[in-house]
Amino acid sequence: MEKAAVFEKVSFKQFEEAWNAWHPEMKEEARNVYDSIPLPHRATAGSAGYDFAAPISIVLRPGEEVRVPTGIRVKMKEGYVLLLFPRSSLGFKYRLQLNNTVGVIDSDYYDADNEGHIFVKMTNDSREGKTVEIRKGQGMVQGIFLPFAIAIDDDAADARTGGMGSTDR
């Protein structure tokens, strides 16, 4: 297996800004939350997915959604992409879904204005009335690195500055 990336935390300043937008009532807890965030990891040697841990406990009733600043960024070799999916068990048991279906983290996102801070927006789409409870530190999504190809006549030369939606402005 080729090694193609390194996970890092974003700066505390970047995390605090995102955290305060998500949880303004919990501003004083930003430092403790940030300090406790682990880098994504694989559970076993045969796992393809890197588990991203929930920075705090999350409870989602049917139909509810949440936007989570993970505190994580990733530096990848050119020619790779990180794809984010719900953890299999959460999707299977609760129909937990990512709001954009699959998160696509491009290699040039690392240098974005927000330090390449990876966010996750999830919805509990349970049709059985099940409430999803994800404990702090429990895996909530998994990321898989894949190589990708480009078209022979590709001529993209612009540089990224922002996050979601910035490449089509």
Image (tube, rainbow, N blue to C red):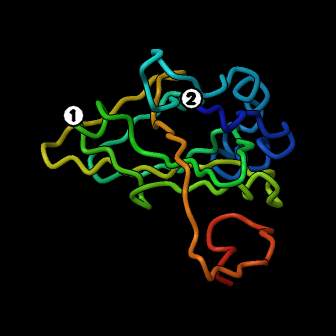
Q: Secondary structure at mark 2?
A: loop
Residue 19: mark in rendering: none
Residue topped by disc 1: 93
Q: Residue at x 75, y 67 (%)?
A: 162
Name the image quarter holding residue 46.
top left
Q: Residue at x 57, y 23 (%)?
A: 41
Q: Quadrant of the C terminus?
A: bottom right
In the image, 41 versus 146, the foreground residue is 146
Q: Residue at x 75, y 38 (%)?
A: 27
Q: Residue at x 29, y 40 (%)?
A: 91
The residues tagged by marks 1 and 2 sit, at their Cα atoms, a distance apart of 21 Å
Residue 30 shown left or right of residue 3 in the figure: right
Residue topped by disc 2: 56
Residue 50 shown left or right of residue 80 in the figure: left
Say which amino acid is labelled 1: Lys
| First reached walking from the N terminus: tag 1 or tag 2 | 2
Residue 63 shown left or right of residue 111 in the figure: left
On screen, residue 41 above or below 113: above
Furthest-front residue in this view: 152
